[in-house]
Image (cartoon, grey):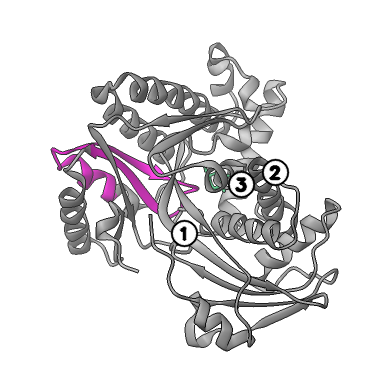
């Protein structure tokens, strides 16, 4: 797990007093189950070692003063008054969103000075925004003794996105950041919120490579996909695609393009999560690769959320004998690829893939996992 950087002295220089609370929350990588969460389906994320750090100190007044270390020399302390949160201030929206939703739940907090430092690359499909929301909610829980369990923290983080930032996301990322670890996947039923931790078999290790192509879920494409699923569900007479039996797929495929393909992705992806959980539990390594590649093909062809750079990384994975399989992870339209490799083979395979990617792409890919390859 990433060691905390020493931001406390910088907090003190900036705000004139030491921080009282210091917490972190991780980004996530999803092994299987993409675009299933807002359809009430299954997901299988893990935490990544990269975290977002929050340092804060409560104030006597109702002012919030926030600084992002990621903005470096360009960054200022941005401020607002509690109760006067207004959307449209860039990264500060995530902070304003947290205090806004807490108040809406009757959980009022006082003012505070805040230092943020994300080691999760922004726009990489690895949930830097969920890590920020969960880290800040953890920090405020500690500083103001809020009675919130980890599931409530995740649900509030999702509300920040949906109700304030304007990104109608599912609950996977915040649940992963709040509840998952790096050694086991979190098998989550997003409808009931029941979850189980499924350890990776000893013979397998994950690889996570950021393509360098960034995305934003407050942008149009993610919303369009979600709306397509809702339209398909309505036309098929179910409240959510989770309620559609597999036997109904032919009826879905008769819907106007592209709705049938969107439904096919969601139904087959849910099945792939269940199958991946079975393979992980039974140590059936041979089954994992085909599942990952099938998920990628489904995201690329049926759900249409991939981009050429991501497809290139997945193709390069196929040339590595130590790599079992690969797929786009996260919301798509850029972002990162997750691979499963034979234990001990990941670092070298990832380095070769990134080197060959750089020969064929204008973007710079970086290896986030295994962590020994990580550059902060
Ligand atoms: C993004 C969203 F935030 C998640 O809720 C999920 O829908 C994911 O895209 C796609 O699986 O990360």
Relative vertical location of residue 32 with respect to residue 54 in this rendering, above or below:
above
> Ligand 1 within 8 A of label 1's CB?
no
- Sequence-wise, the earlier of marks 1 and 2 is 1
> In what element is the residue under mark 2?
helix
Relative vertical location of residue 23 with respect to residue 168 in this rendering, above or below:
below
Q: Residue at x 59, y 87 (%)?
A: 14
Ligand 1 lies in which image quarter? top right
Work out how far the residue at label 1 is from the one at label 3, CA to CA, in angstroms: 30 Å
The local crowd at label 1, few if under 14, some if 14 to 19, many if 20 or more residues have their Cα within 10 Å, is many
Residue numbers of the magenta segment: 312-341
In this figure, which residue is indicated by the disc labeled 2? 152
Q: Position of residue 13 (x, y in %)?
A: 56, 88
Label at residue 154: none
In this figure, which residue is indicated by the disc labeled 1? 51
Q: Contact, CB < 8 Å: mark 3 with mark 2?
A: no
Label at residue 224: 3
């Amino acid at each position: 797990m990433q060691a905390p950087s020493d931001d406390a002295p910088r907090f003190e220089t900036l705000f004139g007093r030491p921080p009282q609370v210091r917490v972190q929350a991780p980004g996530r990588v999803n092994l299987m189950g993409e675009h299933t969460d807002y359809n009430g389906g299954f997901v299988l994320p893990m935490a990544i070692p990269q975290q977002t750090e929050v340092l804060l100190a409560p104030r006597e007044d109702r002012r919030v003063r926030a600084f992002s270390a990621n903005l470096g020399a360009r960054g200022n302390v941005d401020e607002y008054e509690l109760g006067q949160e207004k959307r449209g201030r860039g990264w500060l929206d995530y902070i304003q969103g947290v205090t806004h939703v807490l108040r809406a739940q009757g959980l009022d907090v006082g003012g505070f000075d805040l230092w943020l430092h994300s080691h999760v690359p922004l726009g990489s499909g690895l949930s830097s925004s969920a890590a920020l929301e969960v880290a800040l909610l953890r920090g405020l829980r500690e500083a103001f003794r809020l009675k919130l369990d980890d599931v409530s923290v995740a649900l509030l983080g999702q509300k920040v996105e949906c109700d304030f930032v304007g990104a109608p996301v599912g609950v996977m990322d915040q649940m992963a950041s709040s509840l998952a670890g790096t050694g086991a996947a979190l098998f989550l039923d997003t409808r009931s919120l029941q979850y189980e931790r499924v350890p990776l078999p000893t013979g397998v290790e994950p690889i996570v490579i950021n393509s360098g192509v960034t995305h934003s879920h407050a942008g149009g494409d993610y919303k369009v996909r979600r709306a397509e699923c809702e339209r398909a569900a309505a036309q098929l007479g179910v409240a959510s695609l989770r309620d559609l039996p597999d036997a109904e797929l032919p009826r879905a495929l008769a819907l106007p393009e592209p709705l049938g393909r969107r439904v096919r992705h969601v139904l087959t992806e849910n099945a792939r999560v269940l199958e991946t959980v079975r393979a992980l539990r039974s140590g059936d390594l041979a089954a994992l690769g085909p599942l990952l590649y099938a998920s990628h093909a489904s995201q690329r062809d049926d759900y249409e959320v991939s981009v050429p750079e991501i497809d290139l990384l997945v193709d390069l994975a196929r040339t590595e004998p130590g790599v079992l399989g690969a797929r786009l992870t996260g919301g798509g339209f850029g972002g990162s690829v997750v691979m499963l490799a034979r234990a001990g083979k990941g670092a070298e395979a990832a380095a070769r893939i990134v080197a060959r990617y750089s020969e064929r792409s204008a973007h710079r890919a970086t290896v986030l996992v295994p962590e020994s390859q990580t550059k902060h």
